[in-house]
Image (tube, rainbow, N blue to C red):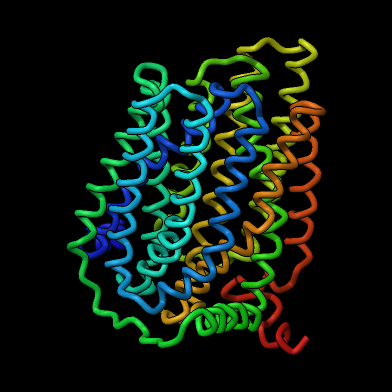
């Protein structure tokens, strides 16, 4: 664990990591509880999916522009100011919930809060991701991303379990109070980060900003492996969001009527799998990111097929509820492992290939392009669940993820993410 230990001798990374832990625990609370709260408030999957779709649309639309803005600014100041602002908005929503029981006003408050927080997250994401290569050496990137993934999954386990308990015991409004407070604490820690990196000074208004976004896209397009990975991620994210972000909460909460701790267990199971795989990868120098993407997608596809069969057998009363839950959790552990198997090498590969002065724009465009179909997925899955049921929604996911897996298998640009690819990047660029 030599490399893993050495990264925490870096004071800047330690402060950054500590701030991330504090803020992310609060975010996990709200991400878990908001959808459940809307389902309890309205009883409809459509309201939850519309809320998530609007929030996602704001995040996707704003991120490329805000990523370009981040490349102009002091990233440390951006980071802690965003966390302070996030804390204030969540505490304001909590104040609204303490002051009224009107469902209409509460829904309006939730939607406003979701839009504001999605916009801030669109700026926070490229800021935090672009800071990691500025704080660490290249050989420290894989252990850093592995350790962040491991601790992130531990946070997720503790966060969703505690969130489920607090949601049942204290209610959604107190989770908002905790979340807002955690963001303020994180911002305070991040104020002490010192990075010797001069932001790019750029003049000009909206036209200049649009030009810089186009420059970032052109940069990605020239690196064929990056733009093709974004394309396959569009397909994958559409069906993953539908299957796990919309279908799974509805299936457990409304369709099966299971208690909130079972929904918390879904996230915990995936986090356990992520931890196991992250620890295994931590001290490896991974050079086959291109191959891992295909095999990770295939692995995830088999897991979703298993979930579909598990639900079907339970729905026709071939297996009892306990067996259904056990099979579901085991499958989700395997699914979580497949995510870390893909993401850690992929993040490292991006950090090695992208110039530091372009990092925020590229990271913003990467997330925006890969998530462009997410709002549509939320709407589509809401209609599918309300109209055709959970089985149809899971079947749709199996088909879609199968298509994405085949795309990653036969796309030579994605396979060139290997540091020692079978097909040279020069040859691909000529083609």
Residue for point 35% across, 68% down: 131
Q: Is residue 157 above or below residue 360?
A: above
Compared across the picture, whether 371 is left or right of 33 comes to: right
Compared across the picture, whether 314 is left or right of 83 comes to: right
Compared across the picture, whether 51 is left or right of 135 comes to: right
User: Is residue 9 something that shows in the picture?
Assistant: yes
Between 389 and 285, the one nearer to me in the picture: 389
Quarter of the rendering containing residue 187: bottom left
Q: Position of residue 366 (x, y in %)?
A: 57, 66
Quarter of the rendering containing residue 13: bottom left
Residue for point 31% across, 46% down: 87
Quarter of the rendering containing residue 393: top right
User: Is residue 268 something that shows in the picture?
Assistant: no
Residue for point 59% across, 34% down: 332
Between 345 and 197, the one nearer to me in the picture: 197
Compared across the picture, whether 356 is left or right of 385 comes to: left
Q: Position of residue 161 (x, y in %)?
A: 40, 27
In the picture, the quarter occupied by the C terminus is bottom right
In the picture, the quarter occupied by the N terminus is bottom left
Residue for point 29% across, 80% down: 197
Q: Position of residue 70 (x, y in %)?
A: 40, 72
Q: Is residue 31 above or below residue 187?
A: above
């Amino acid at each position: 664990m030599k490399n893993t230990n050495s990264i925490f001798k870096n004071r800047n990374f330690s402060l950054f990591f500590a701030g991330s832990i504090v803020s992310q625990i609060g975010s996990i609370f709200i991400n878990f509880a908001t959808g459940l709260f809307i389902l309890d408030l309205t009883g409809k999957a459509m309201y939850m999916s519309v809320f998530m779709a609007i929030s996602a649309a704001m995040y996707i639309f704003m991120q490329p522009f805000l990523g370009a803005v981040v490349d102009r600014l002091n990233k440390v100041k951006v980071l802690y100011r965003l966390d302070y602002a996030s804390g204030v908005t969540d505490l304001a929503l909590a104040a609204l919930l303490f002051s009224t029981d009107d469902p209409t006003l509460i829904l309006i408050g939730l939607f406003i809060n979701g839009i504001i927080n999605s916009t801030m997250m669109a700026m926070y994401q490229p800021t935090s991701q672009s800071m990691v290569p500025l704080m660490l050496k290249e050989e420290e990137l894989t252990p850093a991303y592995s350790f962040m993934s491991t601790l992130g999954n531990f946070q997720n386990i503790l966060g969703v379990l505690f969130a489920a308990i607090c949601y049942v015991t204290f209610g959604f409004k107190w989770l908002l109070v905790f979340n807002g407070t955690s963001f303020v604490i994180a911002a305070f820690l991040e104020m002490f980060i010192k990075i010797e990196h001069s932001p790019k000074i750029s003049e000009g208004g909206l036209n200049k900003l649009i030009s810089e976004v186009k420059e970032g896209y052109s940069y990605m397009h020239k690196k064929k492996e990056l733009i093709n990975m974004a394309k396959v991620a569009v397909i994958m994210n559409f069906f993953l969001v539908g299957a796990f972000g919309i279908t799974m909460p509805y299936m457990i909460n409304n369709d099966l009527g299971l208690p909130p701790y079972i929904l918390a267990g879904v996230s915990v199971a995936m986090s356990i799998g992520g931890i196991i795989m992250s620890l295994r990868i931590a001290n490896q120098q991974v050079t086959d990111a291109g191959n891992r993407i295909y095999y990770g997608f295939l692995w995830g596809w088999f897991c979703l097929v298993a979930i579909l069969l598990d639900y079907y057998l339970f729905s026709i009363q071939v297996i009892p509820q306990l067996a259904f839950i056990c099979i579901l959790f085991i499958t989700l552990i395997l699914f979580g492992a497949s995510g870390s198997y893909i993401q850690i090498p992929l993040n490292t590969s991006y950090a090695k290939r992208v110039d530091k002065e372009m990092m925020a724009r590229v990271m913003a465009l990467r997330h925006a392009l890969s998530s462009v179909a997410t709002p549509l997925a939320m709407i589509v899955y809401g209609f599918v669940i309300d109209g055709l049921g959970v089985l149809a929604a899971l079947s749709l996911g199996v088909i879609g993820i199968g298509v994405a897996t085949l795309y990653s298998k036969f796309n030579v640009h994605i396979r060139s993410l290997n540091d020692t690819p079978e097909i040279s990047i020069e040859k691909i660029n000529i083609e």
